Amino acid sequence: MSLTISDLCIARGGVAVLEGLSFSLEPGQALILRGPNGIGKTTLLRTIAGLQPPVSGVVEGGDETIAYAGHSDGIKPTLTVAENLTFWAKVFGAEGIDAAIAAFDLEILRDRPAGELSAGQKRRLGLSRMLVTGRPIWVLDEPTVSLDVKSVAMFADAVRAHLGQGGSALIATHIDLGLDSEVLEVGPYKAKLPAIDDFDGGFL
Amino acid sequence: MIALLMRDLRLAMRAGGGFGLGLAFFLIVTVMVPLSVGPQAALLGSIAPGVLWLGALLACLLSLDRLLALDWEDGSLDLLATAPLPLEATVSIKALAHWITTGLPLVLAAPVLGVLLNLPVPGFKWVLVSLLLGTPALSVIGTFGAALTVGLKRGGLLMSLLVMPLYMPTLIFGAEVARRGAISMEVQTPLLMLAGISAASIALLPFASAAVLRINLR
């Protein structure tokens, strides 16, 4: 399942941030997005995940194939680690959560309420959700925030295993994950036109 | 879908989930009415159906701001929007979970509280029936209001202002069923209108809620 982006222009708050962006993501491939703060990496990932429409251009192959993980992990603090993960597994129709628990070393935390976890442990729980989605394209926004060196390696291993199974990953990150991946610098695609004139754009 | 319903019910039961808050509010409001009106049994009996309906409506309103806001805050709503579940189904399930945790307890408590208000005997049945028919509409309309204001800081008050006018038709016909029932009058016309409002809200509003949610999630 490949993802193709052609001539994409995206906007945040009615202001175009990136334009003329084209790339494609093949099975087994990982693509790292880099660029300065505010350039529009998160907006790009949300557009690809289908949470907001592009101003122009096309995202192909992104329907029902993308597992998205944003800045927030979507964890319910009063549910246990296993309950949180089981919920997402059921939503995505996946079988069991044991592989995901093992991949991110959550076994000893299994029955702890997620609200009692540390920031790094929560992030690991959030990332383990990707494994239970069973979707081929991972779209990850700053996945390594608050992870320690060991957990980053754990995450890199999970991504590598995912690529090995024919999946692909699009990751916005500033650190080196040690993956055999291409890097896309989005800085040069910064939009030149200042603002879009569509005051009712939100309703279209 | 069942997973989402079970999760929402479980969250409501856990600490801080807010289960029972609406019910407690309903209880306190109805207890305060006789205190403010005074010990006039005949007057209380004639206003009882309206008071019960208004109390249930306000109790319902009270719990709406948590309906989608909590999921929005912790990012679950973004993740649910990218999940295989259509957003229309997600908001319908959330409304159903709200009805089970808030609406249904209110329906069951209303006849008990009717005693405190000296509700005439024929009225008990019709208060129960009208609330049973009307509260699903309150939950679905409330979900629409919650979807409109999700992501706004201090959106709770704005949501109340938006939702209360939308509650009016339900209140008018619901309270009318209960009032007519209490004085043994014919209830068929308002009952049919109430059923129609509920059926139309349940059928149409999830699409509107999902549409505004998509805009708010951008």
Image (cartoon, coloured by chain):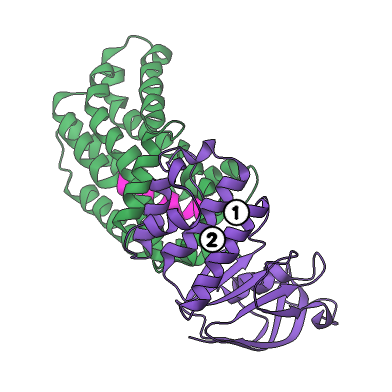
Q: Amino acid at mark 2?
A: Asp
Residue A179 in the image: state x and y as whole percent. 65, 73
Residue drawn at x 18%, y 44% as measured from the top left: B187
Residue A159 in the image: state x and y as whole percent. 55, 69
Residue A23 in the image: state x and y as whole percent. 66, 88
Q: Is A34 contained in the magenta span? A: no
In this rendering, the label closer to the viewer, 1 or 2: 1
Q: Is residue A180 left or right of residue A65?
A: right
> Relative to the observer, which residue lies in front, A20 or B100?
A20
Q: Considering only vertical position in the picture, is A149 above or below B129? A: below
Determine the secondary structure under disc 2: helix
Distance from the alpha carbon under mark 1 to that under mark 2: 9 Å
Determine the secondary structure under disc 1: loop
Q: Which numbered disc covers residue A72?
A: 1
Display colour for chain A: purple
Residue drawn at x 54%, y 60% as measured from the top left: B78
Q: Amino acid at mark 1?
A: Ser
Which residue has dot 2 on it? B78
Display colour for chain B: green
